[in-house]
Image (tube, rainbow, N blue to C red):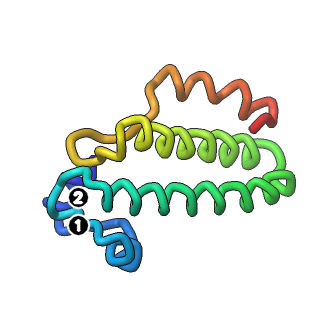
């Protein structure tokens, strides 16, 4: 789903403190400078968390490592799509393509980031 669909269901998954801090209004369903700033802030924060979590990947073995590594790369790809779409999460869903998913598999299986 995209953010617009979530709003229709009464759901907001962005921290209220971030929306308030940047003056971003998801109910407006428009990409504004405030919206871009709020999303970029959360994307940067998420990438920082991913980087910290990468340290723990070496402690996972076998399939656990491969699955988590693949998921991490795919979720990072979603963040990239949001940026590439100029933070427009209202009109379409940010996702990685089937072929991008398939491209992640060999690296994940070989233990690459």
Asked if residue 8 is positioned above or below residue 69 in the image, the reply reads below
Asked if residue 4 is positioned above or below residue 74 in the image, the reply reads below
Asked if residue 86 is positioned above or below residue 27 in the image, the reply reads above
- Badge 1, how many Cα within 10 Å: few under 14, some, many 20+? some
Give how far across and how far down residue 18 sits, in percent: 40, 73
Residue sitting at x 64%, y 39%: 70
Question: Depth-wise, is mark 2 or mark 1 nearer the camera?
Answer: 1
Indicate left or right for 94 with 91 as reference: right
Q: Quadrant of residue 54?
A: bottom right
Total labels drawn: 2
Q: Quadrant of residue 81?
A: top left
Q: Quadrant of residue 49?
A: bottom right
* Residue indicated by mark 1: 25
Give how far across and how far down residue 88 sits, in percent: 29, 44
Residue sitting at x 53%, y 25%: 100
Give how far across and how far down residue 3 sits, in percent: 26, 54
Residue sitting at x 86%, y 52%: 58
Residue 1 seen by the camera = no
* Residue indicated by mark 2: 6
């Amino acid at each position: 789903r995209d953010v617009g669909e979530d709003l229709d269901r009464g759901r907001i998954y962005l921290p209220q403190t971030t929306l308030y801090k940047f003056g971003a209004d998801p109910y407006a369903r428009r990409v504004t400078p405030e919206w871009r700033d709020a999303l970029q802030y959360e994307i940067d924060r998420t990438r920082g968390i991913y980087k910290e979590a990468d340290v723990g990947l070496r402690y996972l073995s076998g399939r656990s490592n491969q699955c988590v590594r693949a998921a991490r790369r795919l979720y990072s790809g979603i963040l990239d799509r949001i940026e590439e779409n100029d933070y427009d999460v209202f009109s379409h869903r940010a996702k990685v393509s089937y072929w991008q998913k398939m491209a992640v598999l060999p690296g994940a299986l070989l233990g690459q980031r």
